[in-house]
């Protein structure tokens, strides 16, 4: 078949596509948009389908992010067309043009302000018509009435008209109040007839009251007479009203001409607005159905995950099924009223919706492939007028399907082979399915025939499916079990309905042994399948639970890592500050030749800072090897610190660490680094730095302080410099390692503040790079 449509009207009707389309149409806001929605058909061009799906998704995002909507407006084509032909529009019609211009401006300005380049392509032909809208709005109010400010002449006429109106009314009222004609007056009320002020006169006094009769009451008892004395003022009033009417028509004609000059652009804008209106309706329908955008694949395949029929609302039971290379034909079997036809229609409806740019109510990841034609044979198509039986109608439809189906076709047949003698119908159905397999069409058919179930089971490329029933109540659950043929529940249902046992027993004896064995095997298979399905569902739930725990653990790990990085950053900042303060203190203590002694207050301050940094950074060295925690040092004991080459006095024994005093400075060291050298009952009271330092190295050209903290390395470097000065060594090479860089930067700050040091720099690549500092002595 060469039709350029995805599905003919008959197929779309059987799939209930019109009901979905009507839901979308009801969400449009413009008359032209509603007409477009009413005429919406599935597209055939697959690239057009991709674009329409992308536009719907982009519009849905715009609604979510910017509360986007389209304002109501009527179809302006009759108005703009008449104006372009030189006809004068009414004030109401001109205001409708303003409403359409404003609606288009509001919508397209928001689209252009969005980040969607795809939606922006819809506005390329849009042109603002602000001058037209402003001119009409300034001259005509929202009720369609021409305002006084529409023209200077109209304003002047209406001011005169108001004055003339008051004058004419007062003139007639004075006649009513006068005593001369009091007996002739029916009611002392001034009224208007034919635009002129008149007085109600009793009919019997008609000949006595001078004036012109304009009307009579329905009873004939009252004459409405214009007094001759008011004739001049009424004539003036009438003349001004005619002038007003001519000026109003002139203003309307001028504004109509202006609108007519822009009629083509007005219609272009409104047409673009109608297209956007349809997109918004599609997106709003998707939101209402909790739909997702289907993944479009080039192969002729379908994979629906937890799809809900859009017309069943909350009653819909999710269905999952797929057609593709491994199985392109599905045979759904099972008792009536179980949901076979619903599943069949849902697939066709989802494909049709997808090809219209509509999202489908299914789980994310659902796929719709590339099809060129949908064929369907669903429902009772008996035609009394054409004297055609149901079976004949099905055969006619199947003839069309077999003639047109190919590898890009989707075929949907309800009760294939039905309507005739069962064995013959099953044979025809099998032959038809074989033909569909040959042409590689995708197909879903429903059946009750055991022969088709067996055929599907034994044939490659076909899969069985069944609608599930509760095994206890035999009530349908409307769930689809793919891979299992449906049972015939005739006997169980009859037994549940109270059919006599002897009748059922006789019926079972009449059923062939082969059929009985098949039904029993099928019942066993269904039970196993149900158990596996339950276990699978349990496994899925457990997997979801495990995934949730993993997600929580991952988030916790990420939070801890973030906290660690932030803590490390804070710690490094504090260390930098401590080193800066220490370097500044050294600079203040430096003089031309001699370093001043460290005062107790300064040493205590530095010790506190260093101890606090130790606690914050957690950089206390780990103790390995021999367990020294059971070795105790008394308060006041003298120890030698191997790493520092210094003697110190124990202040407190804290297990595997010691709080010691080195001259006036206190610090914490590892117990394994201390060797007892004698005892004293009091802590040292201070003294010169040189007196408290032991020789840390001989007079050599380099020293290695890697692994030390700054407070440990500084006295070693100081003693080394003193000995190098005595020995005359220069330049010197200080190895401190790279690490975090804090030790190297701290030592360089110290060296630059030293009175005997000059030309401080990091080593070259062949000297050790940033892990080494090279300097000279003055």
Image (tube, rainbow, N blue to C red):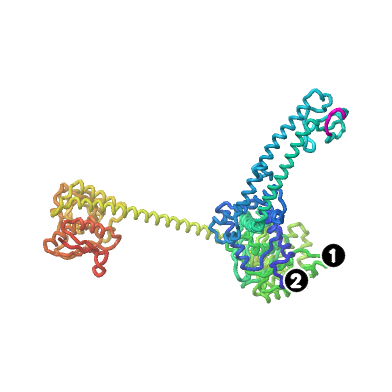
Query: Which residue is located at x 26 percent, y 50 percent?
Result: 609
Q: Is residue 397 above or below residue 539?
A: below
Q: Which residues are magenta?
A: 207-212
Q: Nearer the viewer, residue 532 or 58?
A: 58
Q: Which residue is mark 1?
A: 385
Furthest-front residue in this view: 232
Q: Is residue 3 above or below residue 162?
A: below
Q: Nearer the viewer, residue 469 or 370?
A: 370
Q: Position of residue 41 (x, y in %)?
A: 69, 63
Query: Which residue is located at x 68 percent, y 59 percent?
Result: 36
Q: Is residue 478 visible?
A: yes
Give left or right: position of 78 versus 306: right
Element on which disc 2 rests: helix
Density class for disc 1 (Cα within 10 Å; few <14, some 14-19, many ≥20) is few
Q: Position of residue 231 (x, y in %)?
A: 78, 33
Q: Nearer the viewer, residue 746 or 91?
A: 91
Distance from disc 2 to disc 1, alpha carbons, whole Å, reads: 20 Å
Q: Is residue 245 above or below residue 73?
A: above
Q: Please tell me whether mark 2 or mark 1 is closer to you in this view.
A: 1
Element on which disc 1 rests: loop
Q: Position of residue 178 (x, y in %)?
A: 78, 24
Q: Which mark is residue 398?
A: 2
């Amino acid at each position: 078949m060469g039709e350029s449509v995805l599905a003919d009207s008959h197929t779309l009707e059987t799939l209930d596509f019109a009901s979905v389309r009507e839901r979308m149409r009801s969400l449009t806001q413009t008359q032209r948009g509603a007409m477009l929605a009413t005429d919406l058909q599935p597209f055939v061009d697959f690239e057009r389908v991709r674009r329409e799906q992308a536009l719907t998704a982009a519009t849905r995002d715009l609604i979510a992010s910017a509360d986007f909507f389209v304002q109501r407006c009527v179809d302006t084509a009759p108005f703009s067309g008449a104006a372009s032909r030189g006809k004068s529009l009414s004030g109401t019609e001109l205001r409708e043009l303003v409403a359409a211009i404003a609606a288009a401006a509001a919508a397209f300005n928001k689209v252009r302000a969005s980040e969607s380049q795809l939606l922006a392509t819809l506005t390329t032909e849009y042109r603002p018509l602000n001058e037209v809208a402003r001119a009409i709005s300034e001259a005509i109010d929202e009720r369609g009435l021409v305002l006084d400010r529409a023209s200077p002449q109209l304003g002047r006429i209406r001011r005169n008209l108001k004055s003339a109106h008051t004058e004419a009314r007062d003139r007639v009222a004075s006649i009513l109040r006068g005593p001369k004609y009091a007996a002739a007056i029916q009611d002392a009320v001034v009224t208007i007839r034919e635009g002129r002020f008149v007085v109600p006169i009793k009919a019997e006094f008609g000949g006595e009251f001078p004036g012109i009769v304009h009307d009579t009451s329905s009873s004939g008892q009252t004459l409405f007479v214009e007094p001759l004395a008011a004739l001049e003022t009424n004539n003036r009033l009438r003349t001004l009203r005619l002038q007003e009417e001519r000026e109003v028509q002139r203003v309307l004609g001028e504004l109509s001409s202006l609108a007519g000059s822009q009629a083509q652009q007005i219609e272009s804008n409104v047409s673009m607005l109608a297209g956007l209106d349809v997109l918004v309706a599609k997106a709003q329908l998707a939101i209402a159905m909790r739909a997702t955008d289907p993944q479009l694949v080039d192969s002729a395949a379908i994979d629906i995950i937890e799809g809900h029929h859009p017309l069943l609302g909350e009653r819909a039971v999710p269905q999952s099924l797929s057609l593709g290379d491994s199985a392109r034909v599905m045979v759904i079997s099972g008792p009536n009223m179980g949901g076979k036809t619903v599943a069949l229609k849902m697939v066709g409806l989802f494909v049709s919706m997808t090809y219209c740019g509509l999202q489908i109510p299914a789980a994310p990841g659902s796929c719709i492939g590339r099809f060129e034609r949908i064929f369907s044979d669903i429902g009772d198509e008996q035609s009394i007028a054409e004297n055609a039986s149901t079976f004949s109608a099905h055969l006619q439809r199947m003839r069309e399907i077999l003639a047109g189906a190919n590898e890009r076709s989707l075929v949907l047949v309800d009760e294939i082979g039905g309507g005739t003698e069962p064995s013959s119908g099953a044979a025809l159905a099998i032959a038809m399915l074989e033909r569909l397999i040959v042409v590689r069409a995708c197909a879903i058919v429903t059946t009750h025939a055991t022969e088709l179930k067996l055929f599907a089971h034994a044939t490659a490329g076909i899969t069985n499916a069944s609608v599930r029933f509760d095994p206890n109540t035999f009530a349908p659950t409307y769930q689809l079990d793919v891979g299992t043929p449906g049972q015939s529940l005739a006997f169980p249902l009859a037994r549940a309905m109270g059919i006599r046992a002897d009748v059922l027993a006789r019926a079972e004896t009449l059923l062939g042994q082969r059929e009985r064995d098949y039904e029993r095997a099928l019942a066993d298979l269904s039970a196993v399948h149900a158990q596996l399905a339950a276990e699978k569902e349990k496994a899925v739930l457990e997997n979801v639970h495990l995934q949730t725990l993993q997600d929580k653990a991952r988030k916790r790990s990420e939070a801890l890592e973030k906290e660690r990085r932030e803590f490390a950053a804070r710690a490094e900042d504090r260390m930098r500050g401590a080193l800066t303060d220490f370097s500044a203190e050294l600079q203040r203590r430096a003089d031309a030749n001699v370093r001043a002694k460290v005062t107790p207050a300064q040493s205590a301050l530095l010790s506190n800072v260093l101890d606090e940094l130790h606690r914050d950074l957690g950089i206390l060295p780990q103790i390995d090897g021999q367990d020294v925690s059971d070795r105790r040092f008394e308060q006041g004991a003298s120890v030698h610190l191997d790493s520092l080459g210094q003697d110190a006095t124990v202040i407190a024994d804290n297990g595997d660490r010691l709080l010691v005093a080195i001259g006036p400075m206190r610090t914490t060291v590892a117990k394994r680094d201390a060797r007892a050298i004698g005892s004293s009952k009091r802590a040292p009271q201070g003294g010169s730095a040189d007196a408290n330092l032991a020789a840390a190295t001989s007079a050599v050209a380099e020293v290695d302080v890697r692994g030390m903290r700054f407070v440990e390395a500084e006295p070693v470097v100081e003693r080394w410099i003193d000995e190098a000065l005595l020995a005359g060594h220069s330049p010197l090479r200080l190895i401190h390692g790279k690490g975090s860089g804090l030790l190297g930067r701290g030592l360089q700050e110290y060296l630059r503040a030293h009175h005997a040091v000059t030309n401080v720099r990091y080593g070259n690549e062949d000297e050790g790079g940033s892990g080494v500092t090279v300097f000279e002595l003055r």
